[in-house]
Image (cartoon, helix red, strand yellow):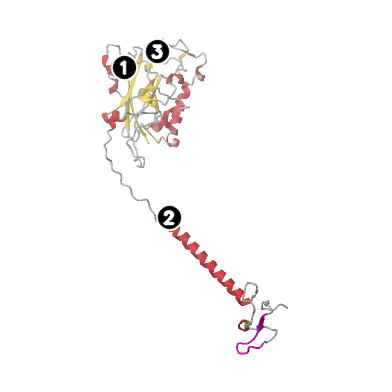
Amino acid sequence: MESKYDRVDVPDNLYLHSDDEPNDFGTGVYPISVISRKSNLKSDTVKHVKVACFRMRRKSRCFLMIGGVIFLIIVILLIVVASNHNGNDKAPAISITVIEEIKLKDIPRVRTSTYVASNHKGNDKAPAIVPTIKEETKLKGLLFEPNVDGSPLIHYSIKDMNTYHKYLNQLDFYMYDYSAVHQQTSDYMNCVNKSASDGKACRLTSHDFGSHCTHTNVYGYQEGRPCILLMLKLDNDTNIEPFTSKDTEITKRLKDRWSDDHVGITCDGETAIDREHMGHEEFWYENGVQETDIMYSPPTGFPVWFYPKMNPHYKVPAVMVHFNTIRSYHLVTIKCVAWAKSFNNGKPQDSEMYSVRFQIYME
């Protein structure tokens, strides 16, 4: 049976006695106070003496435990202090003072294909946009697409495809009629300065609308340069007489896009404010190619030899308009006009039949 006391190894020069009696007690179990060294020890060197007892061992353990607890508390305090220091510190407020006035007019503008001019701050939330014009739904005359749900407003966010997906679907729906694959049959022919032969229709494909306004390029919407499809539907008995070179006012409007066998087309902001937000600046693509602010494809407009409709395969004459410089965060009202001397007595701009309005708001 093991004793609850630890064994004590003592040298020969130790003896046991009481505090009052110096005589030896002999072998046995005694309190620590009675263990002492003889006064006549030949050597006082302690390092060669191995003395151990349960009380001294417990004291060492106690000291180690207390030291460990103190060390742990110190570590925890240091962690808490460091955490509070990092959490409560704030960067000092920095005040920026503009020393020199920067004149924007002295800085040349450089635009890329993904640039959209805007005076709107990025952190501001765009207001709710509603159309401020009302266009009567019409089945003929000058029409525009995408005209979703009969609304004249095209409102979308450049960064969110979900906001303009409906416009892409609408354009895809109409562009299907102008697919080159569907016009490879004998029902179609190429018409140049002449009407189609009996039983045939003039070929008009998506290739005639330029390389930028395509399904692959998302019709320019993701770049903030939306494409609008204009179609001119006329009755078969409509008289078409283009403006001549003597009509200087019109030729000035159309410039080099005027043609004596085409119905010209122009698009611009309806008011001075709208025209300002249209941009009307030189546009440069990333590859260095310069283009105009508004591109028309075909540039001369609607060819007169497409009229009248004589075949069930007839394709309505159309022009794709590519707006390159419309400023974002501005509601821009655009008015397009089909120019012919026979339209509304030479004033098609005053006729709802030969003009169309729509609005664009890009975020």
Labels 2 and 1 touching (C-beta < 8 A) = no
Q: Residue type at mark 2?
A: Asn
Which callout, 3 or 1, points to the residue nearer the camera? 1
Q: Is residue 27 above or below residue 145?
A: below
318 relative position to 65: left or right: left
> Could you say which is closer to the camera, residue 330 or residue 104?
104
Q: Is residue 353 visible?
A: no
The quarter of the rendered structure image containing the N terminus is bottom right
Residue 134: image x %, image y %? 32, 32
Residue 299: image x %, image y %? 38, 18
Instruction: Work out how far the residue at label 3 is from the one at label 1, CA to CA, in angstroms.
Output: 22 Å
Rendering quarter of residue 120: top left
Q: Which mark is residue 135?
A: none
In the picture of the structure, the residue carrying the numbered disc 2 is 86
Label 2, secondary structure: give it: helix
Q: How many marks?
A: 3
Label 1, secondary structure: give it: helix
Residue 224: image x %, image y %? 39, 31
In the picture of the structure, the residue carrying the numbered disc 3 is 305
Labels 2 and 3 touching (C-beta < 8 A) = no
Instruction: Work out how far the residue at label 2 is from the one at label 1, CA to CA, in angstroms.
Output: 67 Å
The residue sitting at 35% across, 51% down in the picture is: 92
Label 3, secondary structure: give it: helix
In the picture of the structure, the residue carrying the numbered disc 1 is 255
Q: Earlier in the sequence, mark 3 or mark 1?
A: 1
The residue sitting at 46% across, 10% down in the picture is: 198
Q: Is residue 238 above or below residue 357?
A: above
> Could you say which is closer to the camera, residue 302 or residue 298?
298
Q: Is residue 172 visible?
A: yes
Q: Residue type at mark 3?
A: Trp
Q: Earlier in the sequence, mark 2 or mark 3?
A: 2
306 relative position to 55: left or right: left
